[in-house]
């Protein structure tokens, strides 16, 4: 895992209140944001896989291949 700063993770300029936070608090915020992004990715993957349950069995392999799953 590469260590990023909060300014690198957030597009654009940080709000003044967040930029004024101490470095250790910003580091904790980076960890929380990173964890939330990972969880969001996992949830999105799980949702995509659960959508396959609504596909007819004959189409599932083709849909998975087309979607890159």
Image: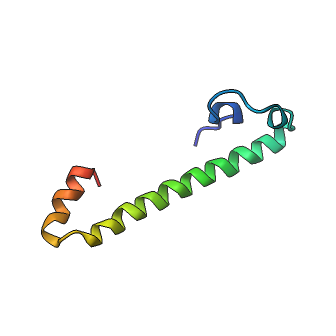
Question: Could you tell me residue 68's position as x and y percent?
Answer: 27, 50
x 76%, y 42%: residue = 27
Judged from this view, the residue extending furthest toward the left is 58
Up-down relation of residue 13 to residue 26 (above or below): above
In this view of the protein, which residue sits in the foreground, 47 or 33? 47
In this view of the protein, which residue sits in the foreground, 20 or 31? 20
Q: Which colour scheme is used?
A: rainbow
Question: Could you tell me residue 11's position as x and y percent?
Answer: 62, 31
Would you identify the image quadrant in which residue 45 lies? Answer: bottom left
Question: Could you tell me residue 34's position as x and y percent?
Answer: 62, 48
x 55%, y 53%: residue = 38
x 87%, y 38%: residue = 22
| Quadrant showing the N terminus | top right
In this view of the protein, which residue sits in the foreground, 21 or 2? 21
Labels in figure, total: 0
| Quadrant showing the C terminus | bottom left
Question: Could you tell me residue 23's position as x and y percent?
Answer: 83, 37
From the viewer's perspective, tell me whether residue 4 is left or right of residue 18. Answer: left
From the viewer's perspective, tell me whether residue 63 is left or right of residue 42. Answer: left
């Amino acid at each position: 895992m590469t260590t990023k700063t909060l300014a690198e993770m957030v597009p654009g300029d940080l709000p003044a209140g967040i930029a004024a936070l101490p470095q250790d608090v910003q580091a904790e915020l980076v960890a929380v944001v990173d964890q939330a992004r990972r969880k969001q990715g996992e949830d999105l993957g799980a949702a995509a896989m659960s959508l396959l349950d609504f596909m007819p069995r004959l189409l599932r392999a083709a849909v998975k291949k087309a979607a890159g799953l």
